[in-house]
Image: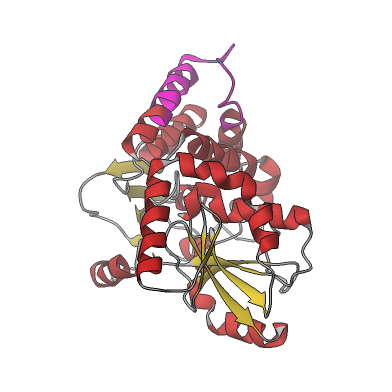
Amino acid sequence: MTVQERISAFTKLGVFLHRVNVDKLENTNACLTDCWDNLHNQINQSVHHNGWFTRENVLFSIQSWANALTEENLIQWTAAYDFTSVSKKTVGIVTAGNIPLVGMHDFISVLISGHQLVIKQSSSDQKLLPIIAQLLICFEPRFKSHITFTDQKLEHYDAVIATGSNNTARYFEYYFGKVPHIIRKNRNAVAVLTGQESETQMEALGTDIFQYFGLGCRSVSKLFVPKNYDFDQLFKAVFKHQIILDHNKYKNNYDYNKTVYLMSQIPLLENGFLVLKEDTGYASPISVLFYEYYDSLALLKLKLNSDRDLIQCLVSDSLTPESVTFGQTQHPQLWDYADGVDTLDFLIRL
């Protein structure tokens, strides 16, 4: 397959995924009809299998990938690379399971670069990607020989891309260290506020905080605010997210973390569904948002740069050229690489 043929297949996949919310398909082939039924079945199964995967979040993830997989995006993404010297290799992928389809970008990157993959999914998120692969094969049958799923340990690979916690990363480094690899650890998104944000920006920040219950590496888990910042502005802006307490797992985390902090006599702010705790850390527990005061934006930029290995993305009103717009953390582009590591460049150099 040429790069153009692979782009065409993924473009068709994106168009198809845009239709996930319609009642039925019409005037399509048997392969797509079967996949359509299987996709909705797997959506239902993933919701029952993982208590954090609500139907709304699963559909949000699918729609986000549909928006990313346009011909324009795919051409823009791949145009910066030279695929002519790629020698086909087998790339092992180990996925995390924190949000639905979290391994999708690695899946796309390996295939768009012309390699074949063997993928071991997290037990928390193993329902959706196989049916996405089946759909892709409907559009381009030659991909069938390029895709293997396994529930056993990875074997017979030339390179590895593995994502997990800081603890599992040490295991990955030991186990996969002898082959070319990308090992991803814990990272979080942060937001820098000045107190001059608009109501619209603050409401959008609420989505960055609460989407996927804050479980994504691009979920905002830490705020940097100026001295004497008025948190009432934040609490008012995120009030519409109070329905998150209807989710039992989130509510249990909120009740537990709030109780632990109160019993430990730790000062905190809270609004009935979100706890704010002053903390220098970046990875806050579910239902908790850390915050830290800054003296000047110039000094803060130096701190953020020194801590860049802990930060997945930065939300701000143009504090840095790489800043993400409020409300857009869960809408990365294909060229927004996890941990800032250019996955496609790594793959074409194998």
Q: Is residue 139 left or right of residue 174?
A: right
Whether residue 19 appears in magenta in the rendering, the answer is: yes
Compared to residue 98, the image places residue 10 above or below, namely above
Identify the residue at horizontal 40%, vertical 43% (top origin). Answer: 52
- In this view, the residue in front, 255 or 314, is 255
- In this view, the residue in front, 257 or 168, is 257
Residue 221 percent location from the top left of the image: 52, 64
Among the 4 quarters of the image, the one containing residue 161: bottom left
Range covered by the magenta-colored residues: 17-43
Colour mode of the rendering: secondary structure
Identify the residue at horizontal 28%, vertical 72% (top origin). Answer: 170
Q: Name the image quarter holding the C terminus.
A: bottom left
Compared to residue 14, the image places residue 150 above or below, namely below
Among the 4 quarters of the image, the one containing residue 295: bottom right
Whether residue 15 appears in magenta in the rendering, the answer is: no
Residue 54 visible in the shown view: yes
Taking the view exactly as shown, the residue that stands out farthest to the top is 27
